């Protein structure tokens, strides 16, 4: 089975590695163009490109997928299957229909839930207890193709989106290898998605990061988990903005945003309270709440309030 792999970020790397380790013939890798990063804006290759080059695989980085250039390259390669994992570009119909075994996508949700760009984060933001990965045939819609195989997992009550990302990435790697094997044997079963059960996982924005302590402790906790590691939840404490990276739900009551205690660092919510365990004052590095509290001199909890 000759495969062309399309992917870009860290999430896709374990899938590519798993296919290579399984002995699949990866004829080429398509990934997004290098982008400037860091303070020096040095051109930086995507993680998938780094992985492909490490294994000596030809890499293509087309700016567009609909101008015929990518199709021409793929027509010469003649892949049996195209596998797409977090590529970040929409494939036109002619490319989707090119390989005889189809274009197969690994999506980080239990479809039809959370179609779109940020399924991992939204599952956490919405307080879901379960999620997973889905292998599906691609069509011209956004994550609307027929489902093939799924793998499910529980979401930990304190698990962040970043931690869940890494777990689902590993699960996706196992799932895509299994999917390729089933495709070769001709045993894949297509299941149409129920559009009535779908929801869209839109891209995250920095505007989402502001914590409303008037909401329940669960909602505040889910916001902190869902926005870790980007863009990070934040709130203003006595006039200074602080990013809040980790919390726990705890007992407590008071005016929303009021700091109830310093050791542990507990803040009242509209219902219940949260203990902040990791934060980042503006202009400083991430630190434990204990380290932050140690830096407060002669300040009592009642003098501190988030807004």
Image (spheres, helix red, strand yellow):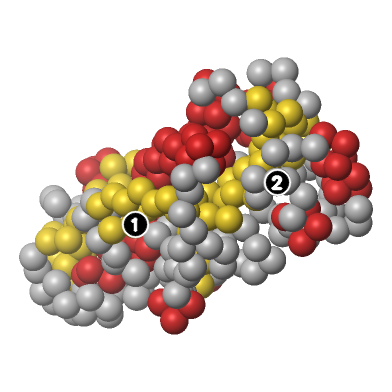
Q: Residue at x 27, y 78 (%)?
A: 215
Of residue 39 and residue 81, the one placed in the foreground of this image is 81
For image coordinates 72% across by 55% down, the residue present is 96
**Which residue sits furthest left?**
251
| Figure quadrant of the C terminus | bottom left
Quarter containing the N terminus: top right
Between residues 239 and 84, which one lies in front from this camera angle? Answer: 84
Residue at left 14%, top 52%? 264
**Label 1 Cα neighbours within 10 Å, binned few <14 / some 14-19 / many ≥20:** many
Q: What's the residue at 45%, 37% (across, down)?
A: 178
The front one of 100 and 224 is 100
| Label 2 vs 1, first from the N-terminus | 2
Q: Check disc 2 and report its element: helix, strand or loop.
A: loop
Q: Position of residue 233 (x, y in %)?
A: 41, 61
The answer to which image quadrant residue 40 occupies is top right
Q: Give left or right: position of 15 versus 25.
A: left
Residue 17 visible, this angle = no
As drawn, is 175 to the left or to the right of 56? left
Mark 1 element type: strand
The residue pinned by badge 2 equals 100
In the displayed structure, does residue 65 sit left or right of residue 284?
Answer: right
| Nearest the eye: 176 or 44 | 176
Q: CA distance from mark 2 to mark 1?
A: 31 Å
| Rendered view: 293 above or below 122 | above
Are discs 2 and 1 less than 8 Å apart at CB?
A: no
* Residue 197 spot, x, y in % from top left: 41, 77
Residue with the mark numbered 1: 131
């Amino acid at each position: 089975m000759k495969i062309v792999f399309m992917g870009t970020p860290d999430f896709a790397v374990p899938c590519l590695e798993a296919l290579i380790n399984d002995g699949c013939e990866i004829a080429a890798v398509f990934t997004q163009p290098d982008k400037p990063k860091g303070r020096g804006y040095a051109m930086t290759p995507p993680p998938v490109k780094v992985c492909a080059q490490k294994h000596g695989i030809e890499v293509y980085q087309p700016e567009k997928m609909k101008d015929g250039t990518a199709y021409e390259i793929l027509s010469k390669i003649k892949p049996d299957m195209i596998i797409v994992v977090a590529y970040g570009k929409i494939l036109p119909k002619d490319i989707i229909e090119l390989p005889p075994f189809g274009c197969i996508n690994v999506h980080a949700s239990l479809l039809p839930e959370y179609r779109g760009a940020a399924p991992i984060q939204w599952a956490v933001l919405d307080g879901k207890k379960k999620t997973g990965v889905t292998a599906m045939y691609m069509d011209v819609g956004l994550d609307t193709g027929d489902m093939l195989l799924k793998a499910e997992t529980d979401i930990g009550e304190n698990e962040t989106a970043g931690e869940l990302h890494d777990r689902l990435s590993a699960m996706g790697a196992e799932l895509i290898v299994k999917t390729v094997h089933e495709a070769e044997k001709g045993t894949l079963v297509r299941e149409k998605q129920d559009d009535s059960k779908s929801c869209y996982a839109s891209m995250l924005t920095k505007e989402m990061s502001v914590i409303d302590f008037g909401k329940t402790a669960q909602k505040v906790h889910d916001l902190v988990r869902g926005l870790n590691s980007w863009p990070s939840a934040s709130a203003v404490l006595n006039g200074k903005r602080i990013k809040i990276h980790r919390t726990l739900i705890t007992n407590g009551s008071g005016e929303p945003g009021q700091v109830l205690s310093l050791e542990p660092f507990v803040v009242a919510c509209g219902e219940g309270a949260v203990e902040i365990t990791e934060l980042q004052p503006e202009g400083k590095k991430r630190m434990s709440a204990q380290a932050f509290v140690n830096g407060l001199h002669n300040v009592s909890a009642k003098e501190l309030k988030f807004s």
